Image (tube, helix red, strand yellow):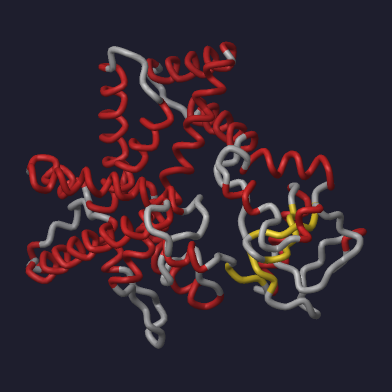
Amino acid sequence: AKKQESSSSIPGNPRGKYPLLGDTIELLNPNTMASYQVSSRRKHGPIWRTSVLFNKCIFVSGAEHLQKLSKQEQLHRNTTACFPPHHRALFGHHSVLVTSGEEHARLRSLITPALQPSLYEEEIRMAVTAFVSRCKNEKDYFPLVDALKQFTLSVALRIVLGEYRWQEWMKSDNNNSRLVALLDDFSIWSKGLLSPPTSFIPFTVSYYAMKARKRIRNILLEVIEEEKEVLNSRDEGSCDRNQKKSLIERLLHATTNNAAANSSLTEEAIVDNIFTLVFAGTDTTASVLTSAFFELAKNDEVRERLQACVEKEEFAENKNDAADETLRAFLSEVQRCYPAAPFTMRNIADTGANGIDLGGKYGR
C-alpha cells in the first residue's frame, strides 16, 4: 500500500530511499519474486517500508496483518488499485483488475456469473484428457513447466472461444494458424507483465508485448463480431438452451439488475477483461501445478498416499468426496508454500479518519 506519511516505527529497506530503484527489480524478476518476501520478512518482520515502481510503499505480510487489512478495505473502501501505466496499458483500462470503486463493483457483478467453473466442466475435461494423452505419448523427457503453461493457456482459450469454435479452428488450416498465433501472442504478452516498462523502446520485451496485445485484440474483436452476428440471426424460438456457450457469448449477454446504470459490457471491456482472465487463470494455475508436481516428485510418501486415495475412490461402488478432500488439502498446502500470486498492490486513498490501521507498534 502506498503511504503518504512516514512512520519511524516501521523498519525499512535501505534501498527504499531510492524511489527510482528500491525493490522493483527484485519484484519484477521471476527468479527472486517469491524469495524477496521471505528474506525481507526475516530481516524486518511482517511489515516494512521500501520503494516499488517509483512509489514509496509499505509491505504487509502474515495472515494476522493481512486479515486486519482486508477487513478495513471492505469496511471503508479506502484503497484503490495500484498499477503503473505500463501494466494498465497491457491489461486495458476497462479491466476489472485495474479499476476501483463503483466501476470495479459494476464490472465484477457483470463478469462473475460467467466464470462459474461448472459452466465449463466439459471443456476442461476434454483439455485435460488431451494433455494427459500427449504426455503419455512423449517418447523422451520434455519441459513440464512450459507444457503446463501451454496447457493452461489452451484451456483458457477453449473457454473464451467456445469448444465448437475451438474444434472448427483446429480443423481449418487458416484458422489453425490463427489459433497457433493467438497462443504465441498470449505468451509474448504475458512476458511483458514481468518486464521493465520500456514499450517505447523498440525490440524490448515490453515493446513486443504491446504489439502482441494489438494483434490479440484484433482477433478477439473479430470473434465478438462473429458471435454477435450469430446471436442476431438466431431464432429465439429455436434456440437450444442446453447448447454450450463460450465465455465471449456469456459476456455479451451479461447485464446487471441496475437499469439506471450502464449495465452491460462494451466490446473493449470484454476484450480487456479476457486479457485479465487469461492472465489470472493461466500462469497462476501452471505455477500451482508445477509446484504440486515438484512436491510429489520429491515426497514419495505423499504421492503414494494420494495415488492410493484416488485409486480407491475410482474403483469404489459408492463414491464419496474423500479423494477430492485429500487432493484439495494437498493443493491448499502447495499454494501456502508456493503462492502463485505472491503480492498485490493497493493505494491508500485516505490517510485520515478512514486510513489504514496497521495495529500495535506500527500505528496508522
Q: How many marks?
A: 0
Q: Is residue 151 above or below residue 248?
A: above
Q: Is residue 245 left or right of residue 198?
A: left
Residue name at image x 59 percent, y 66 percent: 82
Horizontal and vertical percent for residue 88? Answer: 47, 66
Give the x, y percent position of residue 218: 23, 63
- Quarter the N terminus occupies: bottom right
Where residue 209 appears, as percent x and y from the top left, is: 38, 55
Residue at left 74%, top 50%?
Answer: 61
**Image quadrant containing the C terminus:** bottom right
Please tell me whether residue 160 is drawn above or below residue 176 in the rendered image: below
Most foreground residue, 139 or 198:
198
Judge left or right: residue 198 versus residue 101.
left
Quarter assignment of residue 201 = bottom left
Q: Residue at x 57, y 44 (%)?
A: 29
User: Residue at point 68% right, 76% down?
Assistant: 349
Judge by depth and name the residue closer to the eye, 260 or 52: 52
Residue 57: % across, % down: 72, 62
